[in-house]
Amino acid sequence: MRRPMMLIAAILAGLLVTACGSSGHPADPPASVAAVAGDGIVTVSWPTTSGVEYWLFYANSPSISTSNWTAIPGSRSILNAVSPYVVTGLTNGAVYSFTVNGRTNGGPGGEGSPSVSAIPRLAGTATASLPAPWTAGTALGADTMRGLMLGTQFVAVGANGAMYSSTDATNWVALNSGVAANLNAAVHSGVYMAAGDGGAMLHSTDAISWTPRNTGTANNLYAIAANSARIVAVGAKGTIVTSSDGITWAAAAESATANDLYAVTAFGSLWIAVGANGTMVTSSDGSTWKSVASNAALDLKGIAHGTSSATGALIFVAVGASGALVTSPDAATWTAQPAIGANTLSAVTYGTQFIAVGANGSIFTSTDGTTWVGQPSTTNSDLNAIVHAPYGYSVVGAAGVNLLAK
């Protein structure tokens, strides 16, 4: 199927580049084309002229032209491309080249612009060309932000009921949560949920209007997660509450611990929660939990799962106090790894790589879950929550600090 599709694309492009017989004409190539690399993307931009229809050609190659692009394996063309155009689905570390040409009134395509190239790279990792990958945004008030989620927009929550939303993790707007309790965690599962002290739980369908929900507990809730069927919140004294819709909540049938639980995640139908003194519990339904040996003695504050670049296999990662790190291939057998620095790590996530954040502005990245690299941070404030967004990461923390890596 791929060869016929490429043949069709080549024929169409050939018509654009060389076709005659219409009232249109070739257009001059753009005076300049810029290609800016991101995480798995390149943003291509050029000055445009009214009435000109542009085509963008690109390939995993050091160079490209409108005459040789069909001979380059995997090359692509974009009809009616509009500047700036974001090319997605690219491989980090690979060289991609780009050229743009144009036409008027459906005429033949003109000469292509000189080839430009860019190399997509992991967001959040410093490189020679991007030594400072994290950008600090305007503080989200003075309160400590403790939780962060992404639905159709970002929502950050924190101390004293503080709540902010953003469409780009750069420009934030204060929201009225309607509560004064500390909000410690947030998740989006088709609806927006925020959990906090005293068993507080807020529910919203639009991230604007929030409704309190009764969780049936007065214990603090420190973390919340969701899969396709259930939402689970965990907290003080081994508290675990569950819901299928975010509205009606019930206590778990068995929590398997009386220790504080600080983080929870879902992998399909498998649930994992971690907490004080290396506590770890798992569940296949979110309601009945069993204890698992984490081989960690320190508090575990964050947990995530992703793909190891070294093996291509699934790996689970939990982080915590004094840089504690434990990993597992199956969430059943865990191995203690060398500490990631000396600071407490409060959260970890996986997008295109693992990123852990914590005290004193700590940021560490890993592509395999076991080998970690410290990254330059723009703050000394504690970082408490991180979320992976398309082509980047957003982080919030103490005194309203927020960082963004693209």
Image (tube, helix red, strand yellow):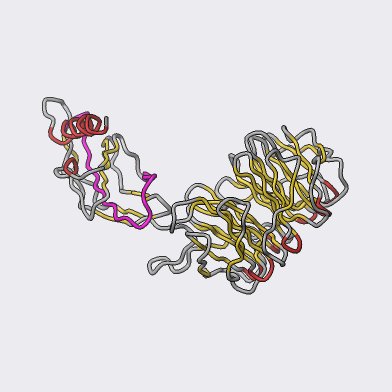
From the viewer's perspective, is residue 338 above or below residue 209?
Answer: below
Name the spot of residue 58 as percent of width and height, x first.
Answer: 27, 46
Residue under the image location 71 percent in, 67 percent down: 298
| Visible residue check, residue 355 | yes
Quarter holding residue 131: bottom left
Residue under the image location 67 percent in, 51 percent down: 156
From the viewer's perspective, is residue 130 above or below residue 225?
Answer: below
Residue under the image location 59 percent in, 73 percent down: 341
In front of the other: 287 or 360: 287
Is 85 within the magenta?
yes
- Is residue 190 found left or right of 120 in the rendered image? right
Image quadrant in which the N terminus is located: top left
Bounds of the magenta span? Answer: 84-108
- Is residue 7 found left or right of 163 in the rendered image? left
In front of the other: 189 or 382: 189
In front of the other: 140 or 335: 335
Is 96 within the magenta?
yes
Quarter holding residue 213: top right
| Visible residue check, residue 351 | no
Name the spot of residue 150 as percent of width and height, x first.
Answer: 60, 45
Name the spot of residue 90 as percent of width and height, x first.
Answer: 36, 48
- Is residue 397 found left or right of 88 in the rendered image? right
Name the spot of residue 311 as percent of width and height, x first.
Answer: 44, 55
